[in-house]
């Protein structure tokens, strides 16, 4: 890298930010000068427009395209529901589907549960920042990095040699025999789930901790004066107060879990019955060059997320009614 | 970036001057200065191009290997004025597809799978090889090799580098100490395995590792391919790869079971690494290392494994480790499997043709091979340029007209099998799934 | 509720009034008086709670800690002994780091170049995504229009669109429209290279928007209605409400989201692989590290060091912006 390169790069950043600032400034200016007639629509278009255009081009269009692709074969010819038939008739389809369900049930509940308990326990305690940082650290690590870290923990060496993986060493300390963790059926899926929980708990802690601090203190005080126990106070005051935060956390983690494939890919490559739909999708669409099959799998993922969407709509409706 | 590339060509005394030049980013000037140091005679036929002419090359070769690749064409660059910009990725196969679909392909792709070349050619993404490349291929490559760049009678790409599979690594000292002899036939190998096992001199006769990240399972496919070729013959091998016989054909099942006789038996594996199941999670790069500790006697891996031995290990017939070629059913068999890359073009610009032609020439093969670590099947290659004893032996094997060469079958098969179910099938199989079930599973995944 | 009457000419007065009312309302409702909050220090924690918190903290840190220790050990020790035996098997080295940081090669110069790229990609993306999402979230939460719920739901559901599926169409659009523009710009203003960050910026911004809008909407829509009404009664239009009420109140959530967006973009490999072109001109750190780590099977010594190199910046960002997490949701309004 030369000085010129560096200057060029800095120039690019500054220029990019300046152009963006100018555009936003113009939008706000136009909002301010909105014509009286149709003013709300005009303002709405300016507020929502930029994001909607980007989303329509970058995500909505690909989503629709994917839906069509799922009914075509490699040559792009229409083949009806063959891809879906293939998906459910493949010998390991049910295992993959079962694993995905297991992931999507375990990761959001456990990560949110641990995150909530942790956030409550460390709230206003000494060293709260340090506590929070320690659990947050995994969030700062990429999925691939997390996979590497835990693969190291699960590493196996035969009994006669010194272990380098912590988990097997702990087993040995308790008098057991080292285990090939990533090949142990069912256990291996749970061990992969642990990695995702490890990553996501930090997110839950940070968001929930912020929500907890938003719970009005006078309510807690009032409850205390009424002689409520810690648990009652938590149940009746804190929990309702952080409901919004909880919905956000569970929803976000659920969607992230459905989409994650890097962890499986790095740690087992989907072998030993650990594959999940997202990993199969990646494999089919990119490695096996079967975009139709990949697209069909992507649509199944989409279906799995429908319950989450429906729940969020209901929460949203309720919120609107209260307002 | 340019600085480091050109620095090697300059005398150390001008390092200081170069540093000054780098700071002012006068890379263009450096290039023309150097041209006088290099004998540009051999490169005249490729023509000269304006400064700043770029050719984008995309491939799977990474890191130190990529560095050598860049070094190999440095003279070509400074004489022709073409800047060859190489980018390597461990997700080449996926990303190449994305870039092509996105309308943004590289100029040249260095693809290690003939199967992928065939698919791209059928989709109409590849351009047929220009005449100059076709001439080079006709002159310097065997028909076996030319065939892997040819789809439906049209030549699309030229081979680049090569490696030979089927080497069985061992410690000559250990063999001598115990009175073991290098086997001449597969039966000998079986007897040797039993002898080693019963001697108790090592933990287990074989050490094996199938793990390789997302590509886990490929070392297993190499085992099977070697056995199909040696045991069932080239005809069955070709039919199998082309899917003219089903994957679950009895001939293939026999090869699988023969492999299983060596490595699907806890008595034979996995020296110093655990039991049979540890194969699936032992990294292929680490799998041979127990030979040095005396924990296992033999390890099956391609010629490139030479680079995986720890620093200070001598690879020679009288050194720490050496390798013998996996024998055939009869002594003196001459069929080997191997791998390599095919260079194919997505652009027919003049400078791209120049680079492609250069890469298919013996000039390039000699330039790259003399930098060490790899070989090429280019017949214009001087075996003396090979960087080590083993590579020299490999080149001689490749250039021997009696040798029957077959490309690694999994690289020729469609990706859904060759880099999909064949890999995962091997992992399941080594985990204890029956041969019949494994073969049926792979067969059912073959794209229609 | 949608029609705001009153003149916009007196924006100044409106401002002051709004912020006054806002302060009062916030204090009223959330009782943010410092001394009072301090009195309720008796908290939920008990001995079991402390033990639980400690346990979680240790379990969550241990794997990374092991990796950190290992990254300073020589390769042969990493592969033969556990990191917890480091006192019996003494041996430290910086080789792993020097290999990762300083290995200059023809294809890849020094890591510094990639480092700059990572920053150059991440910082603008964080700004773009946060600003656009905040505007959209405000519109969805506070501008009433038909089907607004449905627009929100669609945006929300877009989160599940796998990036892999969106890469190819987006790349097609870029190659047909953006690339010629860039080349033209390069001709006109040579200091702008023809390989620019614009593609990566746009791609990341788009992929970050659905979650950003979802998160910000959830918080922005919970801003007390009376604050909005107060501003509206004073004649503020949507632009003024957004800038003078919503943004100040949302500082913590904006900062929180900005941190997450920073982390995702910083750690991304997939988008970079497709849109950066892979050369040192644009490619980020992750791409180089993946190359370093991926080229020789699983060499723990390189992987461990590489993982830590990429971890440093996100941690700095987190620690420096952490106070925004710690403050309450409405802390932004009472910074005085």
Image (cartoon, helix red, strand yellow):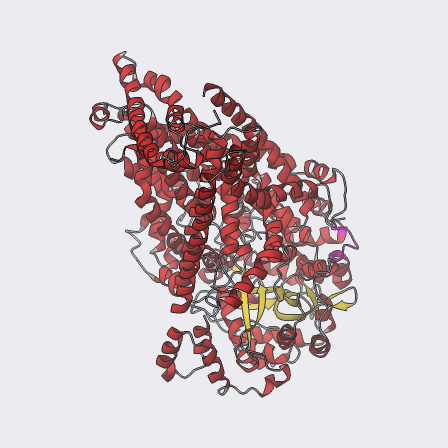
Residue closest to the eye, B24 or C89: B24
Count all numbered tags in the image, as a single digit.
Answer: 0
- Based on the picture, tell me whether residue C83 belongs to the magenta stretch: no
**In this view of the protein, can residue B179 be seen by the observer?**
no
Residue A258 in the image, given as x and y percentages of width and height = 54, 37
Which secondary structure dominates the residues rendered in magenta? Answer: loop
Residue B423 in the image, given as x and y percentages of width and height = 62, 51
Question: What residue is drawn where x is 49% and y is 70%?
Answer: B67
Q: Residue furthest top?
A: A226
Q: Quadrant of the N terminus of chain B?
A: bottom left
Q: Which residues, given as a range, are shown in magenta? A: B240-250
Q: Is B369 on the left-hand or right-hand side of C246? A: right
Vertical relation: B417 (above or below) B136: above
Residue B115 in the image, given as x and y percentages of width and height = 69, 59
Q: Is C74 on the left-hand or right-hand side of B224? A: left
Residue closest to the eye, A83 or C68: A83
**In this view of the protein, can residue C173 be seen by the observer?**
yes
Q: Is A176 on the left-hand or right-hand side of A130? A: right
Residue A186 in the image, given as x and y percentages of width and height = 54, 35
Question: What residue is drawn where x is 50% and y is 41%?
Answer: C209
Vertical relation: A77 (above or below) C218: below
Q: Is A205 on the left-hand or right-hand side of B187? A: left
Vertical relation: B21 (above or below) B59: below
**Location of residue B180 by image quarter:** bottom right
């Amino acid at each position: 890298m030369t000085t010129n390169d560096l200057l060029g790069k800095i120039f690019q950043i500054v220029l990019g930010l300046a152009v963006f600032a100018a555009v936003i400034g113009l939008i706000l200016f136009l909002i301010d000068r909105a014509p009286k007639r149709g003013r709300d629509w005009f303002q709405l278009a300016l507020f929502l427009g930029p994001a909607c255009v980007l989303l329509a081009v970058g995500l909505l269009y690909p989503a629709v395209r994917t839906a069509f692709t799922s009914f075509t074969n490699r040559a792009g010819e229409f083949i009806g529901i063959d891809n879906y038939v293939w998906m459910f008739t493949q010998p390991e389809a049910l295992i993959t589907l079962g694993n995905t369900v297991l992931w999507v049930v375990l990761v959001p509940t456990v990560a949110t549960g641990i995150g909530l308990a942790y956030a409550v326990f460390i709230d206003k305690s000494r060293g709260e920042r340090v506590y929070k940082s320690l659990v947050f650290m995994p969030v700062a690590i990429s999925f691939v990095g997390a996979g590497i870290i835990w693969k190291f923990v699960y590493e196996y060496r035969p009994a006669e040699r010194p272990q380098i993986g912590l988990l097997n060493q702990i087993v040995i300390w308790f008098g057991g025999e080292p285990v090939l963790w990533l090949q142990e059926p069912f256990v291996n899926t749970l061990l992969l789930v642990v990695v995702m929980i490890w990553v996501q708990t930090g997110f839950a802690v940070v968001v929930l901790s912020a929500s907890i601090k938003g719970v009005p203190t006078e309510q807690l005080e009032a409850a205390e004066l009424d002689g409520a126990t810690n648990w009652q106070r938590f149940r009746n005051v804190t929990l309702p107060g952080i409901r919004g935060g909880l919905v956000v956390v569970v929803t976000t983690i659920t969607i992230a879990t459905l989409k994650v494939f890097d962890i499986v890919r790095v740690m087992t490559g989907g072998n030993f019955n650990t594959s999940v739909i997202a990993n199969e999708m990646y494999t089919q669409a990119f490695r096996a060059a079967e975009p139709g099959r990949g697209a069909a799998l992507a649509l199944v993922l989409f279906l799995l997320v429908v319950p989450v969407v429906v729940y969020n709509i209901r929460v949203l409706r309720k919120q609107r009614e209260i307002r | 970036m340019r600085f480091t590339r050109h620095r090697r060509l300059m005398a150390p005394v001008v390092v200081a001057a170069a540093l000054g030049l780098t700071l002012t980013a006068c890379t263009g000037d450096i290039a023309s200065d150097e041209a006088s140091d290099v004998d540009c005679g051999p490169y005249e036929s490729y023509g000269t191009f304006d400064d700043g002419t770029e050719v984008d090359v995309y491939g799977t070769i990474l890191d130190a290997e990529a560095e050598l690749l860049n070094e190999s064409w440095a003279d070509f660059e400074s004489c022709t004025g073409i800047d060859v910009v190489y980018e390597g990725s461990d997700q080449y196969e996926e990303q190449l597809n994305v870039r092509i679909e996105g309308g943004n392909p590289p100029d040249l792709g260095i693809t290690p799978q003939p199967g992928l070349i065939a698919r791209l050619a059928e989709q109409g993404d590849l351009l047929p090889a220009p005449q100059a490349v076709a001439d080079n291929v006709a002159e310097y490559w065997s028909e076996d090799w030319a065939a892997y760049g040819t789809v439906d009678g049209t030549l699309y790409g030229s081979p680049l580098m090569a490696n030979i599979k089927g080497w069985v690594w061992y410690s000559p000292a250990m063999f001598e100490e115990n009175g073991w002899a290098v086997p001449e036939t597969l039966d000998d190998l079986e007897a040797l395995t039993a002898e080693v096992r019963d001697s108790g001199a090592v933990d287990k006769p074989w050490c094996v590792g199938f793990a390789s990240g997302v590509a886990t399972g490929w070392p297993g496919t190499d085992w099977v391919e070697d056995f199909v070729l040696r045991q069932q013959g080239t005809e069955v091998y070709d039919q199998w790869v082309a899917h003219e016989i089903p994957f679950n054909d009895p001939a293939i099942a026999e090869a699988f079971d023969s492999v299983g006789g060596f490595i699907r038996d806890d008595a034979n594996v996995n020296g110093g690494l655990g039991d049979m199941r540890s194969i699936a999670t032992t990294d292929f790069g680490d799998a041979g290392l127990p030979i040095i500790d005396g924990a296992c006697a033999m390890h099956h891996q391609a010629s490139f494994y030479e680079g995986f031995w720890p620093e200070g290990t001598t690879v020679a017939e009288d050194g720490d480790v050496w390798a013998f070629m996996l024998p055939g059913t009869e002594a003196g068999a001459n069929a080997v499997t191997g791998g390599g890359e095919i260079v194919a073009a997505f652009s027919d610009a003049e400078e791209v043709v120049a680079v492609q032609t250069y890469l298919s020439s013996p000039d390039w093969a000699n330039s790259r091979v003399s930098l060490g670590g790899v070989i090429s099947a280019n017949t214009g290659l001087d075996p003396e340029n090979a960087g080590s004893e083993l590579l020299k032996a490999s080149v001689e094997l490749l250039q021997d007209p009696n040798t029957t060469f077959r490309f690694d079958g999994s690289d020729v098969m469609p990706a859904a099998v060759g880099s999909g179910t064949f890999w995962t099938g091997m992992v399941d199989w080594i985990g204890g799934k029956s041969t019949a079930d494994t073969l049926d599973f792979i067969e059912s995944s073959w794209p229609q | 509720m949608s029609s705001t009457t009153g003149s916009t000419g007196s924006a100044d007065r409106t401002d002051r009034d709004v912020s006054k009312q806002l302060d009062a309302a916030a204090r009223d409702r959330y009782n943010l008086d410092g001394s009072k909050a301090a009195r309720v220090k008796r908290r939920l924690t008990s001995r079991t709670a402390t033990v639980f918190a400690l346990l979680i903290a240790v379990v969550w840190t241990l794997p990374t800690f092991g990796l950190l220790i290992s990254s300073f050990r020589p390769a042969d020790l990493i592969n033969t002994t556990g990191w917890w035996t480091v006192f019996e098997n003494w041996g430290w080295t910086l080789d792993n780091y020097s290999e990762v940081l300083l290995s200059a090669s023809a294809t890849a110069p020094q890591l510094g170049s990639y480092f700059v790229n990572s920053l150059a990609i991440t910082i603008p993306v964080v700004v773009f995504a946060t600003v656009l999402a905040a505007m959209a979230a405000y519109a969805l939460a506070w501008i009433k229009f038909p089907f607004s719920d449905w627009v929100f739901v669609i945006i929300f559901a877009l989160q599940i669109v796998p990036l892999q599926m969106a890469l190819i169409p987006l790349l097609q659009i870029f190659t047909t429209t953006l690339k010629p523009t860039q080349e033209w710009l390069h001709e006109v203003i040579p200091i702008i290279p023809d390989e620019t960050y614009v593609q990566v910026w746009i791609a990341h911004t788009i992929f970050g928007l659905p979650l950003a809008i979802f998160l910000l909407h959830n918080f922005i829509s919970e801003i007390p209605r009376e604050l909005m009404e107060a501003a509206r009664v004073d004649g503020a239009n949507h632009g003024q409400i957004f800038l003078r009420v919503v943004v100040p109140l949302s500082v913590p959530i904006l900062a929180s989201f900005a941190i997450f967006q920073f982390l995702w973009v910083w750690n991304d490999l997939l988008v970079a692989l497709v849109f950066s072109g892979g050369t040192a001109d644009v490619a980020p750190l992750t791409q180089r590290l993946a190359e370093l780590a991926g080229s020789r099977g699983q060499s723990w010594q390189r992987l461990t060091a590489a993982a830590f190199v990429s971890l440093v910046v996100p941690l700095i960002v987190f620690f420096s912006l952490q106070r925004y997490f710690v403050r309450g949701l409405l802390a932004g309004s009472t910074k005085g």
